Image (tube, rainbow, N blue to C red):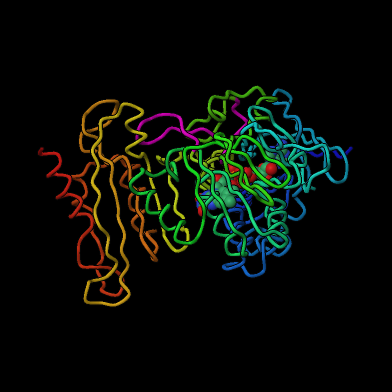
Amino acid sequence: MLTLRKRVLIIGGGPGGRFSYMTLRRMGEKSLSIVMNEDPTVICSLPYGVGRKLVPGGPEEEVVDLANSDRLPPEIVEDAIRGVVTELDAENHIARGTSTEGPFEIHFEKVLLAPGAVPWLPSVKGLLSDKEGYMRDLTEIMVGSEYVSKEKLAENIFVMRGADDARALDAFAEKSDQAVVVGSGAIGLEVVEALHDRGLAVTLVEALPHLIAAMDMDMAGKVSERLSEWGVSIYKNIQLTEVRSDRVVLSDGTEIKTDGVVFATGVRPNVKLARSAELSIERGIVVNEKMQSSHPDIYVVGDAAQISDAVTGRHILPLIGTLAMRQGLVASANIMGKEMFLPPATVWGLSAIFDLHWGSVGWTEELANTLGIQVFSITLPYHTREKAMVNGKEGLWKVVVSASDEKGLKKGQIIGFQVVIDGESPLFLTERFIDIITRRETVSGLFSHYFVHSPYHNTVEDPYLMLLFAAQEAMAH
Ligand SMILES: Cc1cc2nc3c(=O)[nH]c(=O)nc-3n(C[C@H](O)[C@H](O)[C@H](O)COP(=O)(O)OP(=O)(O)OC[C@H]3O[C@@H](n4cnc5c(N)ncnc54)[C@H](O)[C@@H]3O)c2cc1C
């Protein structure tokens, strides 16, 4: 058995774990191990590897070669253990597991836990099989409330989380004519486009009444229209109940012929090890603003960690890669004895489908209504250039505003942002609204946000003032 003694052990080789490794090394930590149970990848780009349009070399191009990375310190080759930690003995500061070389035991002073999230699938008929599946990595999924080894997935069923998932979907795309994608969040839609680009006829199935839960019906409707224009069949407000070898069955009995099914039905924080270490767990692993768990020597970053929403104070699971990396910096600094706190955060996302770009930050009007938060919303047109200029693009943006001083919110506080623009990136507006929303700004604060005008890049209309005027008018009524 391999026995190591390290000051810091990182568990998980996703963005949270790798960024933490990089930061700890930069801060001078030399006694480090990082255990990773699958090929490290640029996870967010995996659907584009399958689609081939943006990554012609396929998903293999997204795999990070640790020995030749221009982002990671070279010492990672020595410090990485390819394996899985199966037990975290917090009391004795020992992690046990198995690697490609056999069992190991690592004695540590501090642990940085970055186990991420596992794909969640509804427990429908035909999901699992006794035959060995495609996985060679040691990763898992969650079916209903049970963790299941990913290799148990039936041959024609796929998820999209790691390198092996993308490889399997890539091979499926090569030999198939039709596919069903279940779930219409960013990942589901990116997979729809990828398979469409590979020439498959794609059907999208969504249990909710409209696509993209992160947007309201009026905004998400634009995305639906775009998918239909590109020939994607959409079934909404209906559930998939069974997968057979050549078709799926929906809850109303509809049968759709298909060669395979991709489940993009969400993820759940991976809390397996946290349980073995008896850490406090609610929606995810509970951490404070230093990313420290209920055990003072165990820090948690990324998709497994539950944080407080800057808007409502509720516990949220943001599931955002860039946030996992920021959390890695915070945890690493605290491990190195430099006190640091995670800046206020919320939920955000940005993606594009068939060149229709969409983004959202914070709370939708629908979700606010469900939570009993009194809101009003303002929707404004978005033109990327003056009418007299060629190549201008059109879009819509929507802002959700608190209508009262209840539930810890201020009247006029901006709590949500959504945008849909045809053919152009709304990145800058989305990032600005992350700041506005996480800093709990009200509409009157919009006056302090300047905009840059340049005819090549935007119209002369000041978006922040337009929103301020519209909001003042709405609040006056
Ligand atoms: C297809 C796709 C597209 C995305 N696009 C975006 C995007 O555009 N922008 C964005 O910000 N975010 C995006 N995300 C979300 C982002 O990828 C996640 O938020 C991010 O990966 C979380 O990082 P993490 O390190 O917490 O977890 P993960 O990336 O899940 O990594 C955790 C790793 O730890 C491993 N692990 C778990 N338990 C153990 C154990 N016991 N021993 C060893 N290893 C273990 C897991 O198998 C996994 O490899 C996307 C996600 C997907 C799947």
Where is residue 364 shown, x and y percent of the image? 35, 40
Q: Is residue 31 above or below residue 430?
A: above
Q: Is residue 384 left or right of residue 292?
A: left
Q: Residue at x 70, y 25 (%)?
A: 276
Q: Residue at x 41, y 29 (%)?
A: 314
Q: Residue at x 65, y 28 (%)?
A: 274
Which quadrant, please, contains the C terminus?
A: top left
Which of the 4 image quadrants contains residue 143? top right
In the displayed image of the protein, which residue is found farthest to the left?
476
Does the magenta run of residues contain 141?
no
Q: Is residue 335 above or below residue 188?
A: above
Q: Choose between 206 and 214: the one closer to the eye.
A: 206
Q: Is residue 470 left or right of residue 131?
A: left
Q: Choose between 261 and 246: the one closer to the eye.
A: 246
Q: Residue at x 48, y 62 (%)?
A: 230
Q: Evaluate whether residue 10 shows in this view.
A: no
Which of the 4 image quadrants contains residue 33? top right
Q: How many marks?
A: 0
Q: Which residues are magenta?
A: 295-317
Q: Evaluate whether residue 77 shows in this view.
A: yes
Q: Is residue 15 above or below residue 301?
A: below
Which quadrant, please, contains the N terminus?
A: top right
Does the magenta run of residues contain 298?
yes
Where is residue 370 shown, x and y percent of the image? 36, 29
Where is residue 121 shown, x and y percent of the image? 62, 36
Which of the 4 image quadrants contains residue 407? top left
Where is residue 294 shown, x and y percent of the image? 57, 25
Q: Is residue 401 left or right of residue 241?
A: left
